[in-house]
Amino acid sequence: MIDGNPIKGRGAGGQVRNRFAERHYADMHWEAIDEPIDEQGQATKYIETHARTIVNRVDSPDLPFRWSLNPYQGCEHGCSYCYARPTHEYWGYGAGLDFERVVLVKRNAPELLEKTLRGPKWQVDPIVLSGATDPYQPIERKERLTRALLEVLWRYKHPAGLITKNGLVLRDIDLLRDMAAERLVSVAISLTTLNEDLRRRLEPRTSSGINRLKAIEVLRNAGIPVIVMIAPIIPALNEPEVPLLLRSAADAGALGAGYTVLRTNGAVGEVFEGWLHTHYPDRAAKIMAQTKELHGGRMSDHEAGRRMRGEGVFATNIARLFNVMKRRYFAGRAVPELDRTAFSPPPQGQLDLFGPAAR
């Protein structure tokens, strides 16, 4: 916040305390009155990191995949509800504005992926880009890491999934078309709202809902299987849009649909509650009360099998609405299973003789 106004293009209203940091820094007036930090002119910083590994094992019964890969840490999209915000604290940054304006770039990701796939112990299972931050966030236009990763996966005939809310995914439709022809890729498009005013506040640097629907249509016309994710469903905010979102995604050609409900783990709670009181003070109390009802009186829930869908009467109502609308609009549709049998790494040592350029 600057002088009581939200920061343009950002989801978080300010910094939040890092739970691992011994000290918390803030600008102070000489008379000991807190001074707001001028964030308005702060451009996003991109910092190269040298990751040691890149493929992460996912041990969660809530998620339908075992492996994820994140070429970027932090995300400029700025979604105020993002469950990945607390991961930035492990790098010494905050889950608030730092998460949006300090993006760590793993430029050695393609090399590390290739090393992983060539390893003698690797067992084929789809790798999802990406499990935390969006692989098509704005910096991807310049860095092209996601495309480079897809090129590695395609070269090795390895199955993969993509999760994004950015129309930039269409840039790579040539690769995705080839991979889909051999059942090696599927794309999940996150669709939260078709209310553009809400989208600009909730997900300030993402593609519009209309452009996401267009991306679904273009991908499907190219033969690429697409799933729509209504995530998260936020009570009294985007919840009433669920039927419209499912119908619109089905009309665009999506083959499947899923959803999660809002939960604000860790520092996300402070970020999201601040966002609510800034943008929707008239209904903040209602949204928080209904979200807590989904999670046994809390804004967060860490219990596997329950945290993504919630519990209680309100969660049951959401599930019934979603399932009825899904049956109505997605009847007879199915997402093809990815092929795990085509994986074909080159023989060990054969390409190494010529260096990375030959790969």
Image: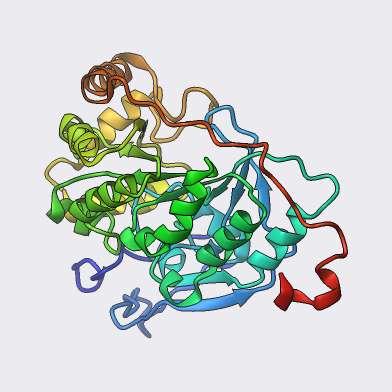
For residue 176, side relative to residue 271 (left or right): right
| Image coords of residue 339 (percent x, y) | 59, 36
**Looking at the rendering, which quadrant does residue 27 occupy?**
bottom left
Q: Quadrant of the C terminus?
A: bottom right
| Image coords of residue 357 (percent x, y) | 71, 78
Asked whether the viewer can see residue 28, the reply is yes
Is 297 rendered above or below residue 250? above
Is 241 rendered above or below residue 86? above
Viewer-side residue, 245 vs 302: 245
Q: Quadrant of the N terminus?
A: bottom left
Is 218 rendered above or below residue 227? below
Residue at image coords 21%, 51%: 209
| Image coords of residue 45 (percent x, y) | 46, 78
Asked whether the viewer can see residue 12, the reply is no
For residue 46, side relative to residue 205 (left or right): right
| Image coords of residue 238 (percent x, y) | 20, 39
For residue 81, side relative to residue 65 (left or right): left
Viewer-side residue, 334 vs 191: 334
Residue at image coords 35%, 25%: 294
Is 289 rendered above or below residue 358? above
Viewer-side residue, 145 vs 9: 145
Viewer-side residue, 350 vs 185: 350
